[in-house]
Image (tube, helix red, strand yellow):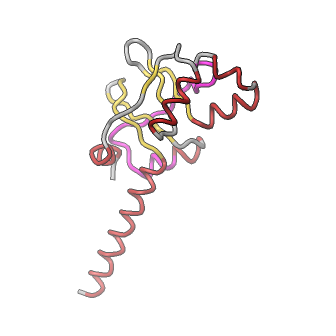
């Protein structure tokens, strides 16, 4: 299974914000949309960062609540790792595990095409395992 199939099922909506957005405004979006990360894009919609709940909690812990008034550039990850629609679930799981993050932007032709979370990937991996087990049962019974 590929990332393209995940996006076809879940959709391609990605919440993005600009680098000058305050951390507080990012927190509001994360809470109101019940999401774990926001992709930061420039005026040309090119990905320039990603910020997750973990990033914000870490910064508040280190610098205090005043970080909420700062631009999101203060706590976003600037070196964004992404995947392509052609990547497999196993490849994406490997990227997420090695880098210890739960959200992976999907890019196509240098542009943001979607985002996958570890929950999306695990859900599809379990569905695949259930299908494989059923096929094996059918093969043995047949």
The picture places residue 26, in percent across and down from the top left corner, at 53, 26
Is residue 75 on the magenta stretch?
A: yes
Looking at the picture, does residue 96 appear above or below residue 24? below
Residue lying at the far bottom of the rendered structure: 141
Is 104 on the left-hand or right-hand side of 73?
Answer: left
Q: Residue at x 60, y 43 (%)?
A: 100
Q: Nearer the viewer, residue 94 or 11?
A: 11
What number of labels is visible?
0
Look at the image and tell me in which quarter the C terminus lies.
Answer: bottom left
Q: Would you say the magenta stretch is mainly helix, strand or loop?
A: loop
Q: Quadrant of residue 46?
A: top left
Is 77 on the left-hand or right-hand side of 11?
Answer: right
Q: Nearer the viewer, residue 7 or 79?
A: 7
Q: Residue at x 76, y 28 (%)?
A: 62
Is residue 17 on the magenta stretch?
A: no
The picture places residue 41, in percent across and down from the top left corner, at 44, 20
Q: Residue at x 59, y 41 (%)?
A: 99
Looking at the picture, does residue 3 appear above or below residue 22? below
What residue span does the magenta drawing correspond to?
A: 72-94
The picture places residue 85, in percent across and down from the top left corner, at 33, 39
The picture places residue 20, in percent across and down from the top left corner, at 53, 13
């Amino acid at each position: 299974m590929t990332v393209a199939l995940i996006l076809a099922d879940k959709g391609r909506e990605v919440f993005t914000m600009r680098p000058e957005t305050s951390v507080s405004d990012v927190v509001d979006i994360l809470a109101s949309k019940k999401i774990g990360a926001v992709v930061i894009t420039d005026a040309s919609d090119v990905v320039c960062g990603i910020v997750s709940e973990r990033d914000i909690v870490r910064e508040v812990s280190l610098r205090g609540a005043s970080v909420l008034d700062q631009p999101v550039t203060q706590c976003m990850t600037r070196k964004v790792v992404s995947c392509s629609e052609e990547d497999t679930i196993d490849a994406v799981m490997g990227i997420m595990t090695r880098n210890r993050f739960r959200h992976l932007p999907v890019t196509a032709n240098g542009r943001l095409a979607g985002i996958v979370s570890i929950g999306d990937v695990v859900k599809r991996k379990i569905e695949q395992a259930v299908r494989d087990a059923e096929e094996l049962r059918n093969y043995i019974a047949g």
